[in-house]
């Protein structure tokens, strides 16, 4: 047997690193093959450019890096914190090598889900939507990673932000069908309302705490009768099923609508009604906890209250409320900065 043949046999032995690498790669279905571009072929109707090449496993990294789920997660987390999303995406693809065969391995499953969530969420925040869609397709359609609610919510948000509402609806429905959980639908609901598709949004999402959203939406698009119908229904069942917060937010929606229509007197009737004193009390309650940070949804109602005070000529009250909002926001900022100095990690406000 020639020396060359001996070298070849040695390279292909069952224990050699080259053989092990080939075995690992070949055992992963569809990863290094062209995949069908039709969304109907896969469980999740993720939109992707059919002309773009499918993502593949970065085989050059396998021999250089420990691709256990915990190490992949740590590497991806470090790279996303450094905003090196290209490298983070490449390392994140290695997560599919650690997918457990047993559904009982919850720790590994959680780490893989967190890796997917980190990279897809980071891509969406940077508005690199097409790359986020490709990664979602790679993880959840091609490699059968168990889907994560936050990842699906990120895709709904991304499609809604792009105005691709029909695709967002299709993705949302298929996610419920195949993943058996409901992703965050508020971005899609609000995008449909902003686009004038209020009836469609209503048929898909109405219920519970969405009363103020749809009252505001129907008012904005001229359907006063439907808005009034919803408000009366909410008022009738206020003590039974719905919170004071929903009722007060609906009142603010009416006040905002009247101001926008130039109906200042009518707006002030809403102001003079279950409203400013209760809303201020709610404001204090919302932010009384030191670990509660302001949300846009909370700030919106109180900005409207400032406008209401100003419209009523109560400038001292308006000024006092602005200062209160600023003090609370600055308090939370300083708390986050203090935490950052201790942990070495940054936080987004």
Image (spheres, rainbow, N blue to C red):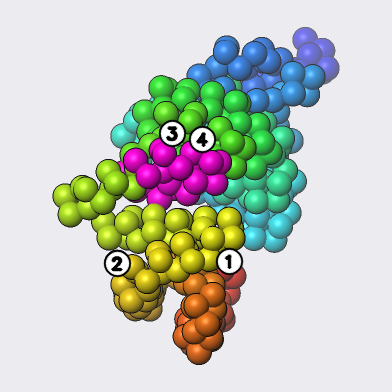
Q: Where is residue 254 in the image (x, y as percent from the top left)?
A: 45, 56
Q: Which residue corresponds to the image point at 37% horizontal and 44% vertical from the top-left?
A: 228
Q: Around disc 2, counting alpha carbons within 10 Å, would you say few (fewer than 14), some (14 to 19), or many (20 or more)? A: few
- Residue 87 in percent (x, y) is at 73, 47
Secondary structure of the residue carrying tag 3 is helix
Quadrant of the frame with the N terminus: top right
Q: Residues within 10 Å of mark 1 (few under 14, many from 20)?
A: few
Q: Name the residue under label 3.
A: 202
What element does badge 4 sit on?
helix
Task: Kindly check if marks 1 and 4 are in contact, taking CB atoms under 8 A apart as contact.
Answer: no
Residue that carries the numbered disc 1 in the rendered image: 348
Badge 4 vs badge 3, beta-carbon distance below 8 Å: yes
Viewer-nearest of discs 2 and 3:
2
Residue at numbered disc 2 = 274
Cα distance between the residues tagged 3 and 1: 32 Å
Secondary element at image label 1? loop
What residue range appears in magenta? Answer: 208-229
Along the polypeptide, which appears first: circle 1 or circle 4?
Answer: 4
Q: Distance between the residues labelled 2 and 4?
A: 27 Å
Q: Which residue does the numbered mark 4 point to in the structure image? A: 198
């Amino acid at each position: 047997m020639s020396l060359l043949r001996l070298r070849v046999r040695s390279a292909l032995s069952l224990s050699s690193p080259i053989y092990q690498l080939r075995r690992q790669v070949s055992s992963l279905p569809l990863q290094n093959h062209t995949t069908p571009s039709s969304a109907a072929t896969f469980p999740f109707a993720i939109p992707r450019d059919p002309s773009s090449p499918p993502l593949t496993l970065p085989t050059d990294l396998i021999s250089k890096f420990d691709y256990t789920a915990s190490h992949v997660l740590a590497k991806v987390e470090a790279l996303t914190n450094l905003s090196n999303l290209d490298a983070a995406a490449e390392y994140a693809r290695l997560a599919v090598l650690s997918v457990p065969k047993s559904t009982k391995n919850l720790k590994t499953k959680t780490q893989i889900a967190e890796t997917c969530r980190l990279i897809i969420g980071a891509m969406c925040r940077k508005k690199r939507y097409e790359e986020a869609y490709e990664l979602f397709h790679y993880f959840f359609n091609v490699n059968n990673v168990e889907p994560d609610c936050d990842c699906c919510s990120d895709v709904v948000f991304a499609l809604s932000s792009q105005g691709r509402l029909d695709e967002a609806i299709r993705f949302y429905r298929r996610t419920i069908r195949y993943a058996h959980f409901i992703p965050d639908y508020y971005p899609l609901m609000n995008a449909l309302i902003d686009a004038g598709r209020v009836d469609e949004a209503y048929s898909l999402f109405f219920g519970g705490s969405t009363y103020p959203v749809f009252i505001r939406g129907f008012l904005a698009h001229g359907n006063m009768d439907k808005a009034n119908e919803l408000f009366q229904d909410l008022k009738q069942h206020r003590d039974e099923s719905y919170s004071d917060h929903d009722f007060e937010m609906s009142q603010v929606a009416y006040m905002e609508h009247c101001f926008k229509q130039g109906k200042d007197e009518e707006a002030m009737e809403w102001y003079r009604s279950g409203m400013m004193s209760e809303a201020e009390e709610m404001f204090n309650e919302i932010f009384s906890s030191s670990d509660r940070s302001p949300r846009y949804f909370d700030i919106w109602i109180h900005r409207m209250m400032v406008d209401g005070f100003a419209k009523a000529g109560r400038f001292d009250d308006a000024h006092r409320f602005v200062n209160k909002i600023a003090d609370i926001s600055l308090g939370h900022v300083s708390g986050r900065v203090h935490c950052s100095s201790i942990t070495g990690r940054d936080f987004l406000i």
